[in-house]
Image (spheres, helix red, strand yellow):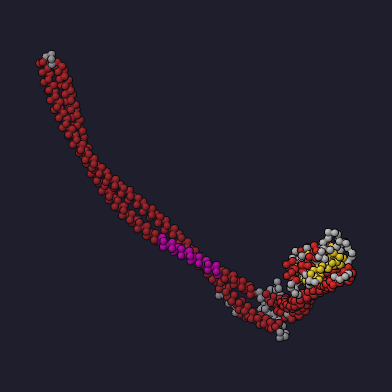
Amino acid sequence: MLSSLRLRILVVTLVVVALALVINVSVSYLTVQTHNEEQIGQQLDAVANGNARAIEEWTSARADMMEAARDPVMGDDPRTALIQLAESGGFLSAYIGRPDGSIMTSDGWDAPGDFDSTTRGWYRDAVERGETIISRPFVDAVSGQQVVSFATPVHKDGRLAGVIGGDVVIDDLIAEVAAIHPTPSSFAFLSVDGETLIAHPDAELTQQPLTVVSDGLTPEFIARLGRQDATWEPLRVDDRAKRLAVAPIDGTDWELGVVLDEDEATAGLRAILESSLITLVIIIAVTALLLSLWLKRTLAGLERARDALEDIASGEGDLTRRLPEQGRDEAAQIAAAFNRFVGKMEAVMVTIRQSSESVRVAATEISTGGQDLSRRTENAASSLQQTSASMEEITSTVEHTAESSRQANGLAESASVVARRGGEAVGKVVDTMQGIRDSSAQISEIVTLMDGIAFQTNLLALNASVEAARAGEDGRGFAVVAGEVRQLAGRSADAAKQIKGLIDTSSARTEEGAAQVRVAGETMEEIVQSVARVTDVLGEITAATGEQSDGIGQVNVAVSELDRMTQQNAALVEESTTAAEQLKDQADRLTEAVAGFTLSEQAQADSRQAMPRLA
């Protein structure tokens, strides 16, 4: 938006003009509004006070008539005085109430027998206040008209002689109040003590509470506004903004209120504002037209410069174009500056063309060299990768051999431990066999002892048999026992002989086993010594294999590091080649961009002479 300089100048100027006019209109409006408010307040106050004074004069005139009739009414012919009072004051009826309760009227009305004038409101109010009073409006029972009663006390010789009263029809007064219209929608009302309506344009509201006109019309509000001079208060009546001024009626409890319509009161002010706004729009429109024509003519030179720059920026980029330098204003200065700028741009383009061609040639050579270096680096990296793979295989084989040596060494150590355990077991067997042999010798001795015992037992049994035979029949039972003992001794001797033979055989075999165990122990000792020698040899092989594995690992690490560095070099070469390619592309783009400008023949000849030559 607002991309055109002319449009921006036009808009800014119109905004400034509009702002100035708005400020002027606002100041004028506020000034007129202040005066208008003062005039409206004065007018409202004048209407309220003027009509209030008229009503006050009307009531005052009748009150004066009532007071002037005191002496005539108290004379010899009171009825005639009452009739004259009624006719001169326009009273519907004039009368006098006496302290005894009787009443005399100007129209000859005969009061009922139970009538007591002292109980009437007009009588009591006049006596209590001691001055002329005006009663609240009421509807006359005979005529059906709105009337008010004037009453004044009469004293004679310092004592109350009666109260003179008169009823006055206030239809004319109501009509006068209803006729008060400062504006078509404005109106006035007459009320008593700020509570009850006496007069209103709507006759149906008579004798109604004042709040039926508006909820804000309370006795306190009316009393407060009545005490203020030349002022008004805002009010809402039937949802319309109003202004209310209240003027109390001196000598009465009445007050006159004038309600002024806000819209109608400020209609002139709105008309001034509307006319000012219309004038503002017309001035802005005329200013826009005249300023647009003047800017179009003034900025024609800038438009030519713009068109020339657009020709340079688009199409063939003709740098041979020049603008006419006519006049001394800013447009002519811009044209001169444009011509100087285009001349410098042409020189810069020639220099850029030469430099871009040089950069393109150098970038081509760098790219070619980088590609060759990249291929050679990739070949070296491939050879290093193969070497690294071979070293890894050798390392794996050596590690496998070292692992096998470690396992064989572990097995040899286990066999040596087992052989030692076997030697110890054989030694224990030898000891056991020796113990068995000793036990066999002891058993042989015991068997020999048993054999001797069996022999002695046999001899004893034989002696017993001999003695039994000698005894004859008495020793027969003993002979039988001795025979049984001899048989047992014989069996014991046979068993001892068999046991001795078995023991002798066992001892011989034990001797043979002990000899064989001793030979086995010697053999196990030789085996243990051989296994220990094998374990030592395998340990030496394992240590040597570990040292070979560590050396090959170091060689492998060095090859891997060399391979990593070669890979990094290859990556750097690739990046250099890519950068050279990008540089070549940028040089080509720069050449194409410069070729988009049309240069003069002299500049092109200079450019060709300065072109670098390829070897």
Relative to 259, is 370 on the left or the right?
A: left
Where 367 falls versus 549 (above or below)? below
Q: Is residue 133 visible?
A: no
Is 133 in front, or is 367?
A: 133
Residue 186 occupies which quadrant of the picture?
bottom right
Q: Is residue 380 magenta?
A: no
Number of numbered callouts drawn: 0
Is 402 in front, or is 416?
A: 416
Quadrant housing the C terminus: bottom right
Q: Position of residue 428 (x, y in %)?
A: 23, 41
Residue 561 occupies which quadrant of the picture?
bottom left
Q: Is residue 250 visible?
A: yes
Residue 461 occupies which quadrant of the picture?
top left
Where 524 falls versus 614 (above or below)? above
In the image, what residue occupies the spot 63% across and 72% down? 592
Q: Position of residue 396 (x, y in %)?
A: 40, 55
| Helix, strand or loop: magenta stretch | helix
In the image, what residue occupies the spot 16% across and 31% down? 446
Is 86 in front, or is 453?
A: 86
Q: Position of residue 502 (x, y in %)?
A: 20, 30
Quadrant housing the N terminus: bottom right
Q: Position of residue 585 (x, y in %)?
A: 59, 70
In the image, what residue occupies the spot 31% across and 52% down? 538
In the image, what residue occupies the spot 48% across and 64% down? 567
Q: Please identify the residue farthest to the front as the structure is shown.
A: 157
Where 451 falls versus 409 (above or below)? above
Q: Please identify the residue farthest to the bottom as the structure is shown.
A: 328
- Residue range in magenta is 555-580
Is 246 in front, or is 332?
A: 246
